Image (spheres, rainbow, N blue to C red):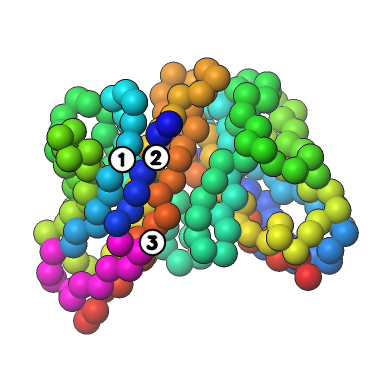
């Protein structure tokens, strides 16, 4: 059973396009996150949601819009893609009362 | 502000020899610290977690880490490296902000295991 899943695993697209990445967790967690891993493997938080409410937004361009239809899902929509958006995007989840996060397998986004 | 510093970007060891991956942290309060491993083209897997219950933390796959407050360190060790340990390792501190936790990652240490 996959705890945190992401789709797609790979995404190749042209500059200027709009794309979405989906994340689902079946752990019953209340909190979900998006992280970006750049080409040097550095990981940084982008967003955090608690029970569908946005809690953390770490100075991410407003071209990035997370959406949480329910507490098991957190999708990431990116408008007007730029070359610098190329990265691996990781979704994670945790219980509300603990700081241990469980990560999805990642989505490798390549913008041409 | 919370931060972690991984002192080595690359570490090479021979199979069967000990592994030491170094991490120093900075925290204004008692931190939660983690080690995660990322195998090539894979996601992040939790190795172990420190939450003040015990200073020596045992994790999966024979890894352990010792929390040393006096040295502000949380180094990861393994007595005997295996080829399958070759991966990227991340030291992480958890920062509670605005009612939720966010991870602050170190820059990673790539472990190479030589046959």
Q: Earlier in the sequence, mark 1 or mark 3?
A: 1
Q: Residue furthest bottom?
A: B115
Tell me if I can see residue B84 in this picture: no
CA–CA distance between discs 2 and 1? 6 Å
Q: Along the line of sight, which residue is nearer the eye, B3 or A94?
A: B3
Residue at label 2?
A: B3
State which quadrant residue B4 falls in.
top left
Which is closer to the viewer, label 1 or label 3?
Answer: 1
Give the answer, above or below, for where B90 lies relative to A56.
below
CA–CA distance between discs 2 and 3? 19 Å
Q: Earlier in the sequence, mark 2 or mark 3?
A: 2
Q: Along the line of sight, which residue is nearer the eye, B83 or A25?
A: B83
Q: A9 left or right of B85?
A: right
Q: Which numbered disc covers residue B25?
A: 1
Q: A45 left or right of B53?
A: right
Asked if residue B10 lies in the magenta stretch, the reply is yes
Marks 1 and 3 belong to one chain: yes
State which quadrant residue A24 falls in.
top right
Residue at label 3?
A: B88
Q: B96 left or right of A78?
A: left
Q: Where does the image place residue B102, in percent across and percent down from the top left?
A: 49, 33
Going 75% across and 43% down the picture, which residue do you hit? A61
Q: Which numbered disc covers residue A52?
A: none
């Amino acid at each position: 059973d996959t705890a945190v899943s992401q789709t797609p695993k790979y995404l190749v697209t042209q500059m200027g396009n709009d794309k979405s990445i989906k994340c689902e967790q079946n752990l019953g967690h209340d909190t979900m996150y998006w992280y970006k891993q750049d080409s040097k493997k550095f990981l940084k938080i982008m967003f955090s949601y608690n029970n569908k409410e946005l809690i953390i937004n770490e100075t991410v361009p407003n071209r990035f819009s997370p959406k949480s239809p329910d507490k098991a899902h957190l999708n990431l929509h990116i408008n007007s893609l730029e070359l610098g958006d190329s990265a691996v995007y990781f979704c994670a989840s945790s219980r509300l009362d603990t700081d241990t996060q469980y990560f999805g397998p990642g989505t490798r986004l390549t913008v041409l | 502000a919370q931060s972690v510093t991984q002192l080595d970007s690359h570490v090479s060891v021979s199979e069967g020899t000990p592994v030491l991956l170094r991490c120093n942290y900075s925290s204004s309060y008692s931190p939660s610290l983690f080690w995660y491993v990322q195998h090539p083209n894979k996601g992040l897997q939790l190795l172990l977690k420190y939450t003040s219950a015990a200073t020596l933390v045992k994790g999966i796959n024979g890894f352990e880490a010792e929390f040393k407050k006096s040295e502000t360190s949380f180094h990861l060790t393994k007595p005997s490296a295996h080829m399958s340990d070759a991966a990227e390792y991340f030291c992480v501190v958890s920062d509670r902000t605005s009612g939720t936790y966010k991870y602050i990652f170190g820059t990673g240490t790539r472990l190479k295991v030589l046959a």
